Image (tube, rainbow, N blue to C red):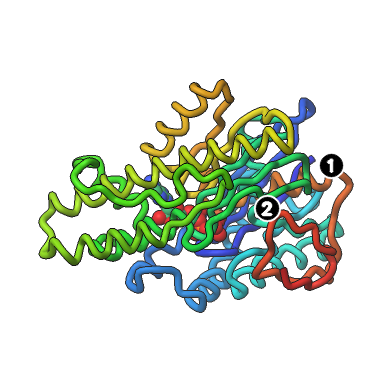
């Protein structure tokens, strides 16, 4: 089985072809990603209208290239999958409409994919992880702990009550005058900073409910930066290191709480899976690796290129859903908001 996947929910225009091998594993035949970072950098964040126009500009070329690099034609595919949300409505419409048009023209089944489900299932493509597992999804827009019990069977057991982790990284970078996107910049600065110089808050630490809160930490960084301004290069590095250390402590503690809730309600997880752009952070990867070792849990972190937005994860989710006998109609409407644990009627524009 071969599926084309299309991703346009945020600021990456991406398409990929993934093949299901007879042994149940997946092979990425092609994966094309065009990031629009340069277009948005001047504004310090993603501008929805600019994103939508860029998707329109790029989508045909990206899809064509994904098919060419994979060496397949539309007729060789067994299905077409496109992310239908959650995300920025303009971009979602571009990808979803393209996917539907290709499915209609080729007569292939169509799958409308939840972008979060795609992040959640990536570890099955990269590492063949078995259900059930605990997913820590940490990206620019989401920070959640999810019990993944099967295709379409997700229970959210924890979430942020305010900012997402990636968003906190981006905002802290902005405060310190570092360019967008902030996560990699903060990590780079932190490498030569002192994580013990500033004692920043670790919100929610020790709580039983595996939720997150990051706005207090973000505000503490802002007040600190204002108090010691003007900032030297070393000040910036030390603030980044101290901020990153606080994030690491919070994530480890919250995942521990999540494991407790998982074991109580869903049995023993086969793995802890970390996904989303923030999973590219090395300090976070190291801390979670230690947590995995200490709790006897298999830790799976897909490579950074598959942690950030890409088309392969959409194609793979298409494969998983088609295998489970699920496909969608041409009347599937975009869902700018679409929580993962809500199996709303898929043919209806349910505002979730
Ligand atoms: P979502 O998937 O929730 O819709 P998104 O598409 O913006 O959001 P991703 O593309 O998965 O999210 O990840 C981007 C986020 O990851 C940004 O906030 C970015 O700052 C953060 N990020 C990327 N690399 C790192 C890093 N090395 N350290 C910390 N954060 C990082
Ligand atoms: Mg992104
Ligand atoms: Fe994403």
Q: Residue furthest front?
A: 207
Asked whether mark 1 and ligand 3 are closer than 8 Å, the reply comes as no
- Which quadrant of the view contains residue 81? bottom right
| Residue 209 screen position, x and y as percent | 58, 47
The residue at 49%/22% (across/down) is 294
Is residue 170 rendered to the left or right of residue 12?
A: left
* Circle nearer the N terminus (1, 2): 2
Q: Quadrant of residue 130?
A: top right
Above or below: residue 351 compared with residue 8: below
Q: Which mark is residue 115?
A: none
Circles 1 and 2 in contact, beta carbons < 8 Å: no
Quarter of the image where the N terminus is located: top right
The residue positioned farthest toward the right in the image shown: 325
Q: Position of residue 230 (x, y in %)?
A: 10, 64
Q: Nearer the viewer, residue 202 or 120?
A: 202
Nearest the camera: 351 or 38? 351
Residue 289 vs 261, above or below: the answer is above
Q: Quadrant of the C terminus?
A: bottom right
Q: Residue at x 46, y 50 (%)?
A: 204
Crowding at mark 2 (Cα within 10 Å: few <14, some 14-19, many 20+): many
Write down the residue under mark 1: 323
Residue of label 2: 5
Name the quadrant containing residue 330: bottom right
């Amino acid at each position: 089985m071969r599926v084309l996947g299309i991703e346009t929910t945020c600021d990456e225009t991406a398409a990929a072809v993934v093949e299901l091998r007879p042994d149940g594993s997946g092979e990425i035949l092609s994966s094309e990603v065009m990031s629009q970072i340069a277009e948005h950098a001047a504004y310090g964040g993603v501008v929805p209208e600019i994103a939508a126009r860029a998707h329109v500009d790029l989508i045909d070329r990206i899809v064509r290239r994904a098919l060419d690099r994979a060496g397949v034609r539309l007729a060789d595919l067994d299905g077409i999958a496109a992310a239908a949300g959650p995300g920025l409505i303009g971009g979602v419409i571009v990808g979803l409409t393209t996917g539907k048009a290709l499915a209609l023209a080729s007569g292939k089944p169509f799958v409308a994919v939840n972008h979060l489900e795609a992040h959640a299932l990536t570890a099955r493509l990269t590492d063949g992880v078995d259900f059930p597992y605990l997913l820590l999804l940490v990206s620019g827009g989401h920070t959640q702990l999810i019990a993944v019990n099967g295709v379409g069977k997700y229970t959210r057991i924890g979430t942020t009550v305010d900012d997402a982790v990636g968003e906190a990284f981006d905002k802290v970078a902005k405060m310190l005058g570092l360019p967008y996107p902030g996560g990699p910049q903060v990590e780079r600065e932190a490498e030569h900073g002192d994580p013990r110089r500033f004692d920043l808050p670790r919100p929610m630490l020790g709580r039983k409910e595996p939720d997150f809160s990051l706005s207090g930490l973000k505000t503490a960084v802002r007040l600190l930066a204002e108090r010691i301004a003007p900032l030297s290069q070393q000040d910036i590095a030390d603030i980044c290191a101290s901020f990153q250390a606080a994030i690491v402590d919070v994530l480890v503690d919250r995942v521990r709480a999540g494991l407790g809730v998982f074991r109580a309600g869903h049995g023993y997880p086969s793995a802890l899976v970390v996904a989303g752009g923030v999973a590219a952070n090395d300090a976070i990867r190291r801390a979670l690796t230690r947590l995995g070792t200490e709790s006897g849990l298999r830790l799976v972190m897909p490579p950074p290129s598959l942690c950030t937005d890409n088309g392969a994860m959409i194609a793979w989710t298409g494969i998983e859903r088609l295998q489970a006998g699920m496909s969608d109609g041409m009347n599937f409407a975009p869902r700018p908001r679409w929580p993962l644990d809500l199996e709303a009627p898929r043919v209806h524009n349910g505002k979730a």
